[in-house]
Amino acid sequence: MDYPIRTLVASLALALSAVAAQAAEPIKIGVDGPFTGGSSSMGVSMRDGVRMAVDEINKSGGVLGRPIALVERDDEAKNERGVQIAQELINKEKVVAVVGYINTGVALASQRFFQEAKIPVMNNVATGTLVTHQFDDQPENYVFRNAAHDSIQAPMIVEEAVTRRGYKRVAILSDSTNYGQLGRADLEAALAQKGIKAVAVEKFNIKDVDMTPQLLKAKEAGAEAVLTYGIGPELAQIANGMTKLGWKVPMIGSWTLSMANFIDNAGPGGEGARMPQTFIQQPTTPKRQSFIVTYLRTFNPKNGRIDSPVSAAQGYDSIYLLTAAIKQAGSTDGPKIKAALENLKTPVEGVVTSYNKPFSAKDHEAITVNIPVFGEVKGQRVVYAYEADAKTASEVRVKDANAKGALVAPVKR
């Protein structure tokens, strides 16, 4: 009889703590991303991953006996809108931290306000290398990230194109945003490390629908592959433009080639595109299976496919990292949360990886080069590009601060 009584008491205590958390003043966390427009498949997926995590945490009693309340804002992928939102979240909403940022330009324009206010920012999607180094000249840095930055992705893209697949003549097509141009620079630097210069370097603008001039220059220069830095809608126009020209060479680019609005708009022309991925929508671990099942049941995306699986998973993980720091700090004070993030004492089991001391005072990047794998568009979904990665997908890749470069062996085309 003793065991059932103890179980009942424990259940009642948990229920009471949950009720108390709901009655307590909520902890406000800002969520900033593009929920409309061309970047929205990333922004909405990220936001939904964040909502999932918060729902789980609140059902378990919240943090410090308080529920989390999300303050969501659509930055429309516009730098000026991001600046307005940052000031609103700080001055009006009094958030204790912010997660999100999809677009590198919006992050760079906005996060300086949080830096000045000493409020932590957890970038969960924006990958521009500069994002976490914007304040290197200051004694403290309040910007963290749990996405694979472009200094990881660009060398991986070049390694895939040049070493693994043997292409020596490559073209670069990138959009004109901060994201595209910083990524293009990272690609050129990675190519230079191999003694290669792109045969054509072309840029395009957001909402461009005709890539014929850029593609013709790449074709005439003898490009064997096209390396890309852009987002879904325009990347689809590249694929469609190649189809229209009757010129099909591989597209190898940043992780955004996995966006639903690339895959759907490119159709057959997008098949075979490859990109680095921190998460592929397959139930390769119990944690990933639970995440996928709950996401699909909660949000019911068409065709059972998350629009941007990487964004959703990283959004989900970002909340657990942040709340682990708040719990450890025992406070919602910005400097104390930052200090806790830089020395997390308890590992955090995430969808992307298991985070064991993911940050330090000098290192605000949770993802290292050994974690991402290559995905490939196949049958309107992203799957593992290499069977070897698929076979070992159940083995969680963890941060290795000593990992240098993308160490892969050449394979036949």
Image: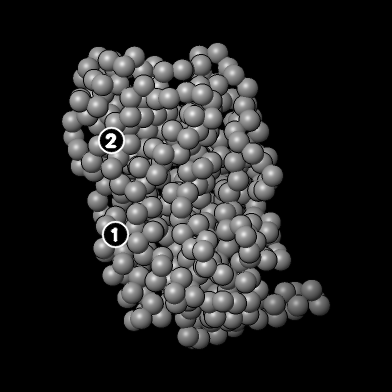
Q: Left or right: 276 with respect to 331? A: left
Residue at the image position 18 percent from the left and 30 percent from the top: 210
User: Nearest the camera: 277 or 395?
Assistant: 277
Q: Left or right: 333 with respect to 45? A: right
Which x, y percent locates residue 157? 48, 31
- What is the quadrant of residue 259 in the picture? top left
- What is the quadrant of residue 258 in the picture? top left
Look at the image and name its color scheme: one colour
Residue at the image position 23 percent from the left and 41 percent from the top: 205
Q: How far apart are marks 1 and 2 (CA)?
A: 20 Å
**Where does the N terminus fall, quadrant-wise?**
bottom right
Q: In this view, does 123 lie above or below 90?
A: above
Judging by the rendered image, the residue that carries numbered circle 1 is 79
Q: Which mark is residue 203?
A: 2
Q: Badge 2: how crowded within 10 Å, few (<14), some, or many (20+)? A: some
Q: Left or right: 404 with respect to 280? A: right
Q: Is residue 358 above or below residue 280?
A: below
Residue at the image position 41 percent from the left and 80 percent from the top: 94
Instruction: Mark yes or no: residue 312 visible.
Output: no
Q: Badge 1: how crowded within 10 Å, few (<14), some, or many (20+)? A: some
